Image (cartoon, grey):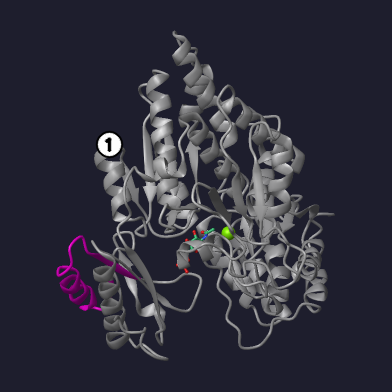
Protein backbone atom coordinates (compact mmCIF):
# COMPACT_ATOMS: atom_id res chain seq x y z
CA UNK A 1 0.00 0.00 0.00
CA UNK A 2 1.23 3.42 -0.93
CA UNK A 3 0.95 4.98 2.51
CA UNK A 4 1.98 2.12 4.75
CA UNK A 5 5.34 2.46 6.43
CA UNK A 6 8.39 1.05 4.65
CA UNK A 7 10.94 0.56 7.42
CA UNK A 8 13.82 -0.24 5.07
CA UNK A 9 13.26 3.05 3.30
CA UNK A 10 13.36 4.89 6.63
CA UNK A 11 16.61 3.17 7.60
CA UNK A 12 18.18 4.05 4.31
CA UNK A 13 17.19 7.72 4.61
CA UNK A 14 18.15 7.87 8.30
CA UNK A 15 21.68 6.74 7.48
CA UNK A 16 22.24 10.14 5.84
CA UNK A 17 21.25 11.88 9.08
CA UNK A 18 23.16 10.03 11.81
CA UNK A 19 22.71 10.96 15.44
CA UNK A 20 25.86 12.43 16.98
CA UNK A 21 27.31 10.36 19.80
CA UNK A 22 27.06 11.51 23.42
CA UNK A 23 24.25 13.97 23.02
CA UNK A 24 21.06 13.63 24.91
CA UNK A 25 18.19 15.54 23.32
CA UNK A 26 15.05 16.68 25.14
CA UNK A 27 11.82 17.99 23.63
CA UNK A 28 11.24 20.79 26.16
CA UNK A 29 8.88 23.76 26.57
CA UNK A 30 9.99 25.18 23.24
CA UNK A 31 10.50 21.90 21.36
CA UNK A 32 14.11 21.03 20.54
CA UNK A 33 16.45 24.00 20.67
CA UNK A 34 20.25 24.17 20.53
CA UNK A 35 23.24 24.91 18.29
CA UNK A 36 22.01 24.47 14.74
CA UNK A 37 24.82 22.10 13.74
CA UNK A 38 23.58 19.51 16.23
CA UNK A 39 20.06 19.40 14.86
CA UNK A 40 20.25 17.55 11.55
CA UNK A 41 19.28 14.10 12.89
CA UNK A 42 16.74 15.62 15.26
CA UNK A 43 14.88 17.45 12.51
CA UNK A 44 14.85 14.38 10.28
CA UNK A 45 13.20 12.47 13.13
CA UNK A 46 10.76 15.24 13.99
CA UNK A 47 9.53 14.83 10.42
CA UNK A 48 8.87 11.18 11.14
CA UNK A 49 7.02 11.99 14.35
CA UNK A 50 4.85 14.57 12.60
CA UNK A 51 3.83 11.97 10.00
CA UNK A 52 2.92 9.49 12.74
CA UNK A 53 0.88 12.17 14.50
CA UNK A 54 -0.98 13.01 11.29
CA UNK A 55 -1.74 9.34 10.64
CA UNK A 56 -2.92 8.98 14.24
CA UNK A 57 -5.25 11.97 13.89
CA UNK A 58 -6.99 10.76 10.77
CA UNK A 59 -4.73 12.57 8.31
CA UNK A 60 -5.18 15.98 9.93
CA UNK A 61 -2.50 18.48 8.91
CA UNK A 62 0.34 18.80 11.43
CA UNK A 63 2.56 21.91 11.47
CA UNK A 64 6.32 22.01 11.91
CA UNK A 65 8.14 25.24 12.74
CA UNK A 66 11.92 25.56 12.46
CA UNK A 67 13.02 28.44 14.69
CA UNK A 68 14.95 29.24 17.84
CA UNK A 69 12.95 32.38 18.61
CA UNK A 70 14.99 34.90 20.62
CA UNK A 71 18.07 32.66 20.94
CA UNK A 72 21.36 33.65 19.30
CA UNK A 73 21.49 33.34 15.53
CA UNK A 74 23.69 30.21 15.54
CA UNK A 75 21.01 28.27 17.44
CA UNK A 76 18.02 26.74 15.82
CA UNK A 77 15.14 24.57 16.90
CA UNK A 78 11.98 22.80 15.89
CA UNK A 79 8.53 22.27 17.30
CA UNK A 80 5.36 20.54 16.24
CA UNK A 81 1.96 22.15 15.99
CA UNK A 82 -1.25 20.17 16.52
CA UNK A 83 -4.25 20.46 14.18
CA UNK A 84 -5.98 23.44 15.77
CA UNK A 85 -2.78 25.38 15.93
CA UNK A 86 -1.96 24.53 19.52
CA UNK A 87 1.27 23.03 20.87
CA UNK A 88 1.93 19.33 20.42
CA UNK A 89 -0.02 17.27 22.96
CA UNK A 90 2.18 16.77 25.98
CA UNK A 91 2.03 12.96 25.98
CA UNK A 92 3.75 12.98 22.57
CA UNK A 93 6.70 15.11 23.71
CA UNK A 94 8.18 11.98 25.14
CA UNK A 95 8.04 10.24 21.76
CA UNK A 96 9.91 13.16 20.24
CA UNK A 97 12.63 12.73 22.85
CA UNK A 98 12.80 8.96 22.30
CA UNK A 99 13.06 9.29 18.53
CA UNK A 100 15.75 11.95 18.80
CA UNK A 101 17.85 9.79 21.11
CA UNK A 102 17.68 6.49 19.19
CA UNK A 103 21.37 5.94 18.48
CA UNK A 104 21.23 3.67 15.42
CA UNK A 105 18.86 3.20 12.48
CA UNK A 106 17.68 -0.07 14.00
CA UNK A 107 16.89 1.60 17.29
CA UNK A 108 15.06 4.33 15.44
CA UNK A 109 12.85 1.80 13.69
CA UNK A 110 12.16 0.09 17.01
CA UNK A 111 10.96 3.37 18.52
CA UNK A 112 8.75 4.07 15.50
CA UNK A 113 7.20 0.61 15.74
CA UNK A 114 6.54 1.16 19.42
CA UNK A 115 4.82 4.49 18.81
CA UNK A 116 2.71 2.88 16.09
CA UNK A 117 1.64 0.02 18.32
CA UNK A 118 1.13 2.08 21.51
CA UNK A 119 -1.18 4.42 19.65
CA UNK A 120 -2.90 1.94 17.42
CA UNK A 121 -1.83 3.92 14.39
CA UNK A 122 -3.27 2.83 11.07
CA UNK A 123 -0.15 2.85 8.89
CA UNK A 124 -2.16 3.06 5.71
CA UNK A 125 -3.63 6.49 6.51
CA UNK A 126 -2.15 9.31 4.42
CA UNK A 127 -0.26 12.06 6.27
CA UNK A 128 -0.40 15.84 5.73
CA UNK A 129 2.32 18.19 6.88
CA UNK A 130 2.91 21.92 6.55
CA UNK A 131 6.21 23.46 7.58
CA UNK A 132 7.84 26.87 7.80
CA UNK A 133 11.08 28.35 9.05
CA UNK A 134 12.35 31.69 10.31
CA UNK A 135 15.20 33.69 8.72
CA UNK A 136 18.14 31.87 10.37
CA UNK A 137 20.97 30.98 7.98
CA UNK A 138 20.85 27.36 9.16
CA UNK A 139 17.19 27.07 8.10
CA UNK A 140 17.51 25.77 4.52
CA UNK A 141 19.83 22.85 5.43
CA UNK A 142 17.54 21.84 8.28
CA UNK A 143 14.54 22.01 5.98
CA UNK A 144 16.22 19.56 3.67
CA UNK A 145 16.79 17.12 6.57
CA UNK A 146 13.14 17.55 7.49
CA UNK A 147 11.96 16.84 3.97
CA UNK A 148 14.10 13.66 3.87
CA UNK A 149 12.33 12.50 7.03
CA UNK A 150 8.89 13.33 5.66
CA UNK A 151 9.57 11.66 2.32
CA UNK A 152 10.83 8.48 3.95
CA UNK A 153 7.21 8.03 5.10
CA UNK A 154 5.58 9.28 1.88
CA UNK A 155 3.89 12.25 3.51
CA UNK A 156 2.07 14.95 1.59
CA UNK A 157 4.08 18.10 2.19
CA UNK A 158 3.32 21.81 1.98
CA UNK A 159 6.30 24.16 2.16
CA UNK A 160 4.96 27.39 3.70
CA UNK A 161 8.34 29.09 3.32
CA UNK A 162 9.84 31.74 5.58
CA UNK A 163 7.18 32.76 8.10
CA UNK A 164 6.65 33.91 11.67
CA UNK A 165 5.86 31.13 14.14
CA UNK A 166 2.27 32.35 14.65
CA UNK A 167 1.67 32.40 10.88
CA UNK A 168 2.52 28.70 10.81
CA UNK A 169 0.14 28.06 13.71
CA UNK A 170 -2.55 30.03 11.88
CA UNK A 171 -2.20 28.16 8.62
CA UNK A 172 -2.16 24.76 10.34
CA UNK A 173 -5.54 25.52 11.89
CA UNK A 174 -6.90 26.93 8.62
CA UNK A 175 -6.12 23.72 6.75
CA UNK A 176 -7.85 21.57 9.34
CA UNK A 177 -11.09 23.51 9.68
CA UNK A 178 -11.52 24.77 6.13
CA UNK A 179 -15.16 24.64 5.06
CA UNK A 180 -16.44 23.66 8.52
CA UNK A 181 -18.41 25.87 10.89
CA UNK A 182 -15.11 26.63 12.64
CA UNK A 183 -13.52 28.00 9.46
CA UNK A 184 -10.52 30.11 10.44
CA UNK A 185 -9.64 31.90 7.21
CA UNK A 186 -7.74 31.24 4.01
CA UNK A 187 -4.74 28.96 4.53
CA UNK A 188 -2.32 31.43 2.93
CA UNK A 189 -0.05 34.23 4.06
CA UNK A 190 -2.24 36.64 2.13
CA UNK A 191 -5.33 35.25 3.90
CA UNK A 192 -3.67 35.96 7.24
CA UNK A 193 -2.97 39.61 6.38
CA UNK A 194 -6.43 40.15 4.96
CA UNK A 195 -8.13 38.71 8.02
CA UNK A 196 -6.12 40.83 10.46
CA UNK A 197 -6.19 44.02 8.41
CA UNK A 198 -9.95 43.91 7.83
CA UNK A 199 -10.61 43.27 11.51
CA UNK A 200 -8.26 46.07 12.59
CA UNK A 201 -9.90 48.62 10.34
CA UNK A 202 -13.30 47.64 11.73
CA UNK A 203 -12.25 48.13 15.35
CA UNK A 204 -10.65 51.55 14.80
CA UNK A 205 -13.07 52.92 12.20
CA UNK A 206 -14.10 56.48 13.00
CA UNK A 207 -11.36 57.08 15.60
CA UNK A 208 -8.34 59.34 15.14
CA UNK A 209 -5.18 57.55 14.14
CA UNK A 210 -2.46 57.47 16.80
CA UNK A 211 1.09 58.75 16.37
CA UNK A 212 3.54 56.32 14.68
CA UNK A 213 4.47 53.09 16.37
CA UNK A 214 8.22 52.40 16.26
CA UNK A 215 8.78 48.67 15.91
CA UNK A 216 12.04 46.89 16.68
CA UNK A 217 11.73 43.66 14.69
CA UNK A 218 14.87 42.01 16.21
CA UNK A 219 16.29 41.82 12.66
CA UNK A 220 14.09 38.79 12.22
CA UNK A 221 11.20 37.46 10.21
CA UNK A 222 8.81 39.90 11.88
CA UNK A 223 10.34 42.74 9.83
CA UNK A 224 9.21 41.79 6.32
CA UNK A 225 5.95 40.36 7.64
CA UNK A 226 5.05 43.50 9.58
CA UNK A 227 5.72 45.60 6.48
CA UNK A 228 3.40 43.41 4.49
CA UNK A 229 0.71 43.59 7.16
CA UNK A 230 1.02 47.39 7.37
CA UNK A 231 0.52 47.62 3.59
CA UNK A 232 -2.71 45.69 3.89
CA UNK A 233 -3.93 47.95 6.69
CA UNK A 234 -3.06 51.24 5.05
CA UNK A 235 -1.31 54.35 6.34
CA UNK A 236 -4.52 56.09 7.17
CA UNK A 237 -5.16 53.58 9.96
CA UNK A 238 -1.70 52.70 11.25
CA UNK A 239 1.73 54.20 10.80
CA UNK A 240 4.41 51.62 11.51
CA UNK A 241 8.08 52.69 11.51
CA UNK A 242 10.51 49.78 11.63
CA UNK A 243 14.00 49.60 13.13
CA UNK A 244 16.16 46.48 13.34
CA UNK A 245 14.55 45.24 10.17
CA UNK A 246 17.74 43.92 8.56
CA UNK A 247 16.99 40.23 8.44
CA UNK A 248 19.46 39.41 5.68
CA UNK A 249 22.79 40.47 7.20
CA UNK A 250 24.27 37.61 9.20
CA UNK A 251 24.95 38.17 12.88
CA UNK A 252 22.19 40.69 13.52
CA UNK A 253 19.25 38.53 14.51
CA UNK A 254 18.31 39.21 18.16
CA UNK A 255 21.65 40.90 18.72
CA UNK A 256 21.06 43.53 21.43
CA UNK A 257 17.52 43.93 20.28
CA UNK A 258 14.14 42.26 20.31
CA UNK A 259 11.50 41.67 22.97
CA UNK A 260 13.59 39.31 25.09
CA UNK A 261 16.56 41.70 25.19
CA UNK A 262 14.34 44.65 26.10
CA UNK A 263 12.42 42.76 28.79
CA UNK A 264 15.49 41.23 30.43
CA UNK A 265 17.83 44.18 30.26
CA UNK A 266 15.03 46.72 30.80
CA UNK A 267 16.44 49.18 28.28
CA UNK A 268 16.00 50.36 24.72
CA UNK A 269 17.15 48.04 21.95
CA UNK A 270 20.22 48.93 19.96
CA UNK A 271 19.23 51.18 17.06
CA UNK A 272 16.18 52.70 18.73
CA UNK A 273 16.19 56.48 18.82
CA UNK A 274 12.87 57.09 20.48
CA UNK A 275 12.35 60.28 22.42
CA UNK A 276 9.89 61.36 25.06
CA UNK A 277 6.40 61.16 23.57
CA UNK A 278 7.25 58.42 21.05
CA UNK A 279 5.60 55.02 21.14
CA UNK A 280 7.60 51.84 20.65
CA UNK A 281 7.38 48.04 20.67
CA UNK A 282 9.76 45.11 20.17
CA UNK A 283 9.10 41.71 18.60
CA UNK A 284 11.26 38.67 19.25
CA UNK A 285 13.11 36.72 16.53
CA UNK A 286 10.14 34.64 15.38
CA UNK A 287 7.52 37.29 16.18
CA UNK A 288 5.50 35.46 18.80
CA UNK A 289 6.29 37.91 21.61
CA UNK A 290 5.83 41.64 21.94
CA UNK A 291 6.58 44.25 24.58
CA UNK A 292 5.84 47.99 24.46
CA UNK A 293 7.88 50.85 25.94
CA UNK A 294 8.46 54.59 26.01
CA UNK A 295 10.77 57.07 27.66
CA UNK A 296 9.43 59.40 30.31
CA UNK A 297 10.01 63.19 30.64
CA UNK A 298 13.13 62.55 32.69
CA UNK A 299 14.41 60.06 30.12
CA UNK A 300 13.68 56.96 32.16
CA UNK A 301 12.86 53.83 30.25
CA UNK A 302 9.35 52.50 30.90
CA UNK A 303 8.38 48.97 29.96
CA UNK A 304 4.88 47.78 29.19
CA UNK A 305 5.26 44.01 29.28
CA UNK A 306 2.92 41.05 28.87
CA UNK A 307 1.26 41.76 32.22
CA UNK A 308 0.40 45.28 31.14
CA UNK A 309 -0.96 43.98 27.83
CA UNK A 310 -3.14 41.46 29.72
CA UNK A 311 -4.55 44.29 31.85
CA UNK A 312 -5.22 46.49 28.83
CA UNK A 313 -6.82 43.73 26.78
CA UNK A 314 -8.80 42.31 29.71
CA UNK A 315 -10.15 45.74 30.64
CA UNK A 316 -11.22 46.57 27.10
CA UNK A 317 -12.91 43.22 26.52
CA UNK A 318 -14.74 43.34 29.85
CA UNK A 319 -16.05 46.82 29.03
CA UNK A 320 -17.24 45.66 25.60
CA UNK A 321 -18.94 42.57 27.03
CA UNK A 322 -20.75 44.75 29.60
CA UNK A 323 -21.74 47.42 27.11
CA UNK A 324 -22.93 44.77 24.68
CA UNK A 325 -25.17 43.39 27.43
CA UNK A 326 -23.71 39.91 27.08
CA UNK A 327 -24.07 38.89 30.72
CA UNK A 328 -23.30 35.25 31.16
CA UNK A 329 -19.97 35.48 29.35
CA UNK A 330 -17.20 35.25 31.88
CA UNK A 331 -13.76 36.73 31.30
CA UNK A 332 -10.64 35.48 33.09
CA UNK A 333 -6.92 36.17 32.99
CA UNK A 334 -4.16 33.56 33.16
CA UNK A 335 -0.65 34.41 34.34
CA UNK A 336 2.50 32.65 35.54
CA UNK A 337 4.50 33.21 38.71
CA UNK A 338 6.57 35.77 36.77
CA UNK A 339 3.62 38.14 36.58
CA UNK A 340 4.40 41.24 38.56
CA UNK A 341 2.59 41.22 41.93
CA UNK A 342 1.10 44.64 41.18
CA UNK A 343 -0.50 43.33 38.00
CA UNK A 344 -2.18 40.48 39.84
CA UNK A 345 -3.46 42.84 42.54
CA UNK A 346 -4.75 45.25 39.87
CA UNK A 347 -6.58 42.51 37.97
CA UNK A 348 -8.11 40.95 41.05
CA UNK A 349 -8.84 43.99 43.19
CA UNK A 350 -9.43 46.83 40.74
CA UNK A 351 -10.78 45.03 37.71
CA UNK A 352 -12.45 42.24 39.68
CA UNK A 353 -11.36 39.61 37.18
CA UNK A 354 -10.61 36.03 38.18
CA UNK A 355 -6.89 35.32 37.76
CA UNK A 356 -5.31 31.86 37.50
CA UNK A 357 -1.62 31.16 37.91
CA UNK A 358 -0.05 28.24 36.02
CA UNK A 359 3.48 26.93 35.37
CA UNK A 360 5.65 28.65 32.74
CA UNK A 361 5.16 27.65 29.11
CA UNK A 362 2.52 28.47 26.55
CA UNK A 363 0.76 25.12 26.67
CA UNK A 364 -0.08 25.56 30.36
CA UNK A 365 -1.46 29.06 29.87
CA UNK A 366 -3.39 28.10 26.77
CA UNK A 367 -5.14 25.18 28.41
CA UNK A 368 -6.07 27.18 31.47
CA UNK A 369 -7.43 30.03 29.35
CA UNK A 370 -9.73 27.56 27.59
CA UNK A 371 -11.61 27.19 30.87
CA UNK A 372 -13.08 30.69 30.58
CA UNK A 373 -15.63 31.91 28.02
CA UNK A 374 -13.05 34.54 27.13
CA UNK A 375 -9.60 33.72 28.47
CA UNK A 376 -6.83 36.31 28.30
CA UNK A 377 -3.39 34.81 28.82
CA UNK A 378 -0.02 36.51 28.85
CA UNK A 379 3.41 35.70 30.14
CA UNK A 380 5.29 38.69 31.51
CA UNK A 381 7.80 38.17 28.66
CA UNK A 382 5.17 39.27 26.14
CA UNK A 383 3.84 35.99 24.85
CA UNK A 384 0.09 35.78 24.96
CA UNK A 385 -3.29 35.95 23.32
CA UNK A 386 -7.02 35.83 23.98
CA UNK A 387 -9.14 32.71 23.52
CA UNK A 388 -12.86 32.84 22.75
CA UNK A 389 -14.72 29.64 23.62
CA UNK A 390 -17.29 28.18 21.24
CA UNK A 391 -20.00 29.48 23.55
CA UNK A 392 -18.53 33.00 23.50
CA UNK A 393 -18.16 32.95 19.71
CA UNK A 394 -21.72 31.80 19.27
CA UNK A 395 -23.09 34.45 21.63
CA UNK A 396 -21.02 37.23 20.05
CA UNK A 397 -21.97 36.24 16.53
CA UNK A 398 -25.68 35.83 17.20
CA UNK A 399 -26.18 38.87 19.46
CA UNK A 400 -28.05 41.75 17.89
CA UNK A 401 -28.20 44.44 20.55
CA UNK A 402 -30.95 46.95 21.23
CA UNK A 403 -29.25 50.32 21.36
CA UNK A 404 -26.67 51.83 19.01
CA UNK A 405 -24.12 51.55 21.79
CA UNK A 406 -24.81 47.86 22.23
CA UNK A 407 -24.64 47.20 18.52
CA UNK A 408 -21.29 48.94 18.27
CA UNK A 409 -19.84 46.95 21.17
CA UNK A 410 -21.03 43.71 19.59
CA UNK A 411 -19.47 44.68 16.23
CA UNK A 412 -16.18 45.42 17.96
CA UNK A 413 -16.18 42.13 19.82
CA UNK A 414 -16.85 40.34 16.55
CA UNK A 415 -13.94 42.08 14.91
CA UNK A 416 -11.71 41.22 17.87
CA UNK A 417 -12.39 37.51 17.37
CA UNK A 418 -10.81 37.88 13.92
CA UNK A 419 -8.09 40.31 14.93
CA UNK A 420 -6.69 38.08 17.64
CA UNK A 421 -4.69 35.02 16.59
CA UNK A 422 -6.30 32.46 18.83
CA UNK A 423 -3.87 29.68 18.07
CA UNK A 424 -0.88 31.15 19.91
CA UNK A 425 0.70 34.45 21.02
CA UNK A 426 1.40 36.52 17.91
CA UNK A 427 3.44 39.74 17.95
CA UNK A 428 1.75 41.11 14.81
CA UNK A 429 -1.77 40.33 15.94
CA UNK A 430 -1.04 41.49 19.52
CA UNK A 431 0.40 44.74 18.18
CA UNK A 432 -2.83 45.37 16.31
CA UNK A 433 -4.85 44.46 19.39
CA UNK A 434 -2.97 46.97 21.54
CA UNK A 435 -3.07 49.63 18.82
CA UNK A 436 -6.81 49.06 18.37
CA UNK A 437 -7.50 49.45 22.08
CA UNK A 438 -5.29 52.52 22.46
CA UNK A 439 -6.95 54.05 19.38
CA UNK A 440 -10.39 53.43 20.82
CA UNK A 441 -9.43 54.82 24.19
CA UNK A 442 -7.24 57.57 22.65
CA UNK A 443 -4.61 56.76 25.25
CA UNK A 444 -0.90 57.45 25.20
CA UNK A 445 1.44 54.74 26.46
CA UNK A 446 1.80 56.71 29.64
CA UNK A 447 -1.94 56.74 30.20
CA UNK A 448 -2.03 52.99 29.69
CA UNK A 449 0.92 52.60 32.07
CA UNK A 450 -0.93 54.45 34.82
CA UNK A 451 -3.19 51.51 35.64
CA UNK A 452 -0.63 50.33 38.21
CA UNK A 453 3.11 50.59 38.96
CA UNK A 454 5.23 47.48 38.65
CA UNK A 455 7.02 46.34 41.78
CA UNK A 456 10.78 46.38 41.19
CA UNK A 457 11.81 42.89 40.12
CA UNK A 458 14.95 40.97 39.32
CA UNK A 459 15.78 37.72 37.58
CA UNK A 460 19.02 35.91 38.42
CA UNK A 461 20.46 32.73 36.87
CA UNK A 462 22.25 30.21 39.05
CA UNK A 463 24.36 27.46 37.50
CA UNK A 464 24.11 24.24 39.49
CA UNK A 465 25.48 20.72 39.03
CA UNK A 466 22.05 19.23 38.45
CA UNK A 467 19.02 21.41 37.94
CA UNK A 468 16.76 18.36 37.83
CA UNK A 469 16.91 18.00 41.62
CA UNK A 470 14.69 21.10 41.83
CA UNK A 471 11.03 20.09 42.12
CA UNK A 472 8.33 22.73 42.36
CA UNK A 473 4.65 22.90 43.21
CA UNK A 474 1.89 25.54 43.36
CA UNK A 475 2.49 26.73 39.77
CA UNK A 476 6.25 26.82 40.41
CA UNK A 477 5.89 29.23 43.31
CA UNK A 478 7.21 26.77 45.90
CA UNK A 479 10.05 24.30 46.01
CA UNK A 480 9.33 20.77 47.20
CA UNK A 481 12.93 19.69 46.72
CA UNK A 482 15.72 20.09 47.73
CA UNK A 483 13.94 19.65 51.04
CA UNK A 484 14.22 22.48 53.49
CA UNK A 485 15.29 25.08 50.95
CA UNK A 486 11.84 26.64 50.60
CA UNK A 487 11.66 27.26 54.36
CA UNK A 488 14.95 29.13 54.22
CA UNK A 489 13.74 31.17 51.25
CA UNK A 490 10.52 32.00 53.12
CA UNK A 491 12.52 33.28 56.01
CA UNK A 492 14.45 35.63 53.74
CA UNK A 493 11.29 36.84 52.02
CA UNK A 494 9.62 37.67 55.33
CA UNK A 495 12.19 40.40 55.92
CA UNK A 496 11.19 42.47 52.88
CA UNK A 497 8.16 44.65 52.35
CA UNK A 498 6.03 43.24 49.50
CA UNK A 499 8.74 40.62 49.12
CA UNK A 500 8.12 37.65 46.85
CA UNK A 501 10.62 35.23 45.42
CA UNK A 502 10.61 31.81 43.83
CA UNK A 503 13.09 29.38 42.33
CA UNK A 504 12.53 27.05 39.36
CA UNK A 505 14.68 25.02 36.99
CA UNK A 506 14.69 26.50 33.48
CA UNK A 507 13.03 24.47 30.75
CA UNK A 508 15.24 25.91 28.00
CA UNK A 509 18.68 26.44 29.57
CA UNK A 510 20.87 24.46 31.94
CA UNK A 511 20.32 26.85 34.85
CA UNK A 512 18.04 27.51 37.81
CA UNK A 513 16.17 30.82 37.74
CA UNK A 514 15.55 33.00 40.76
CA UNK A 515 12.85 35.66 40.62
CA UNK A 516 12.38 38.31 43.26
CA UNK A 517 10.30 41.42 43.73
CA UNK A 518 9.99 43.84 46.65
CA UNK A 519 8.85 47.36 47.50
CA UNK A 520 12.06 49.09 46.43
CA UNK A 521 14.80 48.43 43.89
CA UNK A 522 17.40 48.00 46.64
CA UNK A 523 15.32 45.54 48.64
CA UNK A 524 14.41 43.62 45.52
CA UNK A 525 18.04 43.24 44.41
CA UNK A 526 19.14 42.26 47.87
CA UNK A 527 16.43 39.62 48.13
CA UNK A 528 17.21 38.26 44.64
CA UNK A 529 20.91 37.86 45.32
CA UNK A 530 20.36 36.42 48.81
CA UNK A 531 18.02 33.76 47.47
CA UNK A 532 20.42 33.06 44.60
CA UNK A 533 23.28 32.72 47.09
CA UNK A 534 21.23 30.32 49.17
CA UNK A 535 20.49 28.17 46.13
CA UNK A 536 24.15 28.24 45.15
CA UNK A 537 25.34 27.20 48.61
CA UNK A 538 22.69 24.62 49.39
CA UNK A 539 22.00 23.00 46.05
CA UNK A 540 25.25 22.38 44.25
CA UNK A 541 26.10 25.74 42.72
CA UNK A 542 29.07 25.71 40.37
CA UNK A 543 31.20 28.12 38.39
CA UNK A 544 31.00 31.10 40.73
CA UNK A 545 28.30 32.54 42.90
CA UNK A 546 25.96 35.09 41.29
CA UNK A 547 27.52 38.47 41.89
CA UNK A 548 26.87 39.70 45.39
CA UNK A 549 24.53 42.55 45.93
CA UNK A 550 26.03 45.98 46.67
C1 LIG B 1 9.76 28.88 26.22
C2 LIG B 1 8.27 29.01 26.28
C3 LIG B 1 7.91 30.32 26.94
C4 LIG B 1 8.55 30.39 28.31
C5 LIG B 1 10.02 30.15 28.24
C6 LIG B 1 10.59 29.96 29.63
C7 LIG B 1 6.70 28.18 24.64
C8 LIG B 1 6.29 28.21 23.21
N1 LIG B 1 7.72 28.97 24.95
O1 LIG B 1 10.33 29.87 25.42
O2 LIG B 1 6.52 30.35 27.05
O3 LIG B 1 8.33 31.63 28.90
O4 LIG B 1 10.27 28.95 27.53
O5 LIG B 1 11.93 29.59 29.56
O6 LIG B 1 6.13 27.48 25.46
P1 LIG B 1 12.68 29.00 30.83
O7 LIG B 1 12.01 27.71 31.21
O8 LIG B 1 14.07 28.83 30.37
O9 LIG B 1 12.56 30.02 31.91
MG1 LIG C 1 9.54 33.53 20.15
Please name the residue that numbered disc 1 is placed on: 352
Mark 1 residue's CB less than 8 Å from ligand 1: no
Q: Would residue 488 be counted in the magenta stretch?
A: yes
Q: What residue occupies the far front of the structure in this picture?
A: 298
* Location of residue 194 by image quarter: top right
Please give the name of the residue rendered at 44% of the width and 55% of the height, measured from the top-left corner. 303
As for residue 319 lying within the magenta part, the answer is: no
Determine which quarter of the picture holds residue 199: top right
In front: 216, or 501? Answer: 216
Residue at 61% in and 63% down: 69
Please provide percent x and percent y for residue 127.
74, 51
The image shows residue 336, relative to residue 374, as above or below, that is: below
Task: Name the foreground residue: 107 vs 324.
Answer: 324
Residue 428: x and y in percent read 61, 46
Q: Position of residue 87 (x, y in %)?
A: 56, 53
For the point 23% across and 61% down, the residue is 519
Quick check: 383 left or right of 358? right
Residues shaded magenta:
480-503
Residue situated furthest top in the rendering: 402
Figure label count: 1
Q: Percent from the top left, x then y, of residue 285?
A: 63, 61
Bin the neighbour count of mark 1 within 10 Å (Cα to Cα): few under 14, some 14-19, many 20 and up: few
Give the quarter the ligand 2 occupies. Answer: bottom right
**Is residue 542 positioned above or below 500 on the image?**
below
State the residue lying farthest toward the bottom. Answer: 543
Amino acid sequence: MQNSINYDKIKEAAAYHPKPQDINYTYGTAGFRMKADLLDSVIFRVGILAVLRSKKLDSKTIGIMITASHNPEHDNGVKLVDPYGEMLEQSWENYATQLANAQTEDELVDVIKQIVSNNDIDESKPANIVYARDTRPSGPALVSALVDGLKSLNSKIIDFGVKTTPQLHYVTRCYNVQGTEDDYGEPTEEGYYKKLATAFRKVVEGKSRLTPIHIDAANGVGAPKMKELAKHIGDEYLEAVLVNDDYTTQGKLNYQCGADFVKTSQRLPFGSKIKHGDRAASFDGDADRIVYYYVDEDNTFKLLDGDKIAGLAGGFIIDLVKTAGLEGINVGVVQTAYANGSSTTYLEKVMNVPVSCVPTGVKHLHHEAEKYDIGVYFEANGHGTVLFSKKALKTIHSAEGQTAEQKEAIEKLRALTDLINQTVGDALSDLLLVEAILTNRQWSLKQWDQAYSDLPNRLVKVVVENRHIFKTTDAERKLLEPTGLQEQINELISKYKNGRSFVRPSGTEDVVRVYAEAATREECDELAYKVAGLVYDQAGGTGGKPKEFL
